[in-house]
Image (spheres, rainbow, N blue to C red):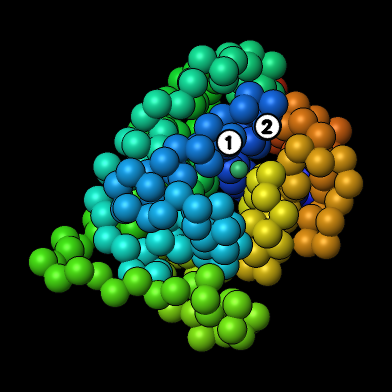
Amino acid sequence: MEFEDRCHKVQEPKFDCLLFDLDDTLYPLSSGISGHVKTNIEAYMVEKLGIDESKIENLGNLLYKNYGTTMAGLRAIGYSFDYDEYHAFVHGRLPYDNIKPDPVLKHILNNLRIRKLIFTNGDKVHAVRALKRLGLEDCFEGIICFETLNPPCPPQGDEEPEIFDIAGHFARSGTADELPKTPVLCKPNVDAMEEALRIANVNPHKAIFFDDSVRNIQAGKQIGLHTVLVGKSQRVKGADHALESIHNIREALPELWEEAEKAEDVLYADRVAIETSVTA
Ligand SMILES: [Mg+2]
């Protein structure tokens, strides 16, 4: 009976997948990368989309707040641009040297015998480059990234696009009602997140989601994920755990190691039983 119980637990672990955001989750905010991303996005808006510099800060904040990413917001209000070119501009010149190899995290991940996936709003080139800098490129089964959820942007016609005045909208109505929809799928949009999990064949009720963004964590909770807010010591609504550093996974989720150890115990017990019966 006891053996059956152990088998039951091994066959049906509570969790079977870990989903990790990348930026400011697998490496610390103190790397300064996110500040450079923001600066580069603003430069893209001025240099490539011709937006007046004086409007950038307010517009960027409104888009980020209402659409999850500035890029998703830019598409919603009417701008068309090549996604690869945008990503190359925003990420291509980041100071990747600021991201340091993390052998401690590598050791932790390699000791967790469970599916591990990256789930980032960033593009694949950026994700691979950052993971290589961290020394973690071999630690994950796959990367769910911008391209996983978004086909290329349709080419823009010759006509000048009509741009929705989102700043004017908020000045007039003060609400997010009746904002244009974005064609871009990204966190924290719950439909985008559910689609990502479907593509990767992840059952949200058996997965743990690590992210530094409160709204991503809250959206994750909404779709049934077990959630861990990273980079903060205080839990917020929607977060099952809060970790100051991703290095503290074991303290927050000791059951992951307990399950792995139990699985090993049973495998070992089976092996001993088989070997004993062969020699007997
Ligand atoms: Mg992040």
Residue that lies at the very extreme toward the right in this rendered image: 234
What quarter of the picture does the C terminus occupy?
top right
- Mark 2 nearby-residue class (10 Å; few <14, some 14–19, many ≥20): some
Q: Secondary structure at mark 1?
A: helix
Residue under the image location 17 percent in, 63 percent down? 156
Quickly name the residue at label 2.
29
Query: Height in image: 165 above or below 235?
Result: below
Residue 13 drawn at (x, y percent):
70, 49
Quarter residue 102 falls in? top right
Quickly name the residue at label 1.
34
Residue under the image location 52 percent in, 76 percent down? 168
Query: Height in image: 46 above or below 243?
Result: below
Amino acid type of the residue tagged 2 in the rendering: Leu
Residue under the image location 45 percent in, 44 percent down? 41
Mark 1 vs ligand 1: CB under 8 Å?
yes
Residue 33 drawn at (x, y percent):
56, 30
Residue 189 visible in this rendered orientation of the protein: no
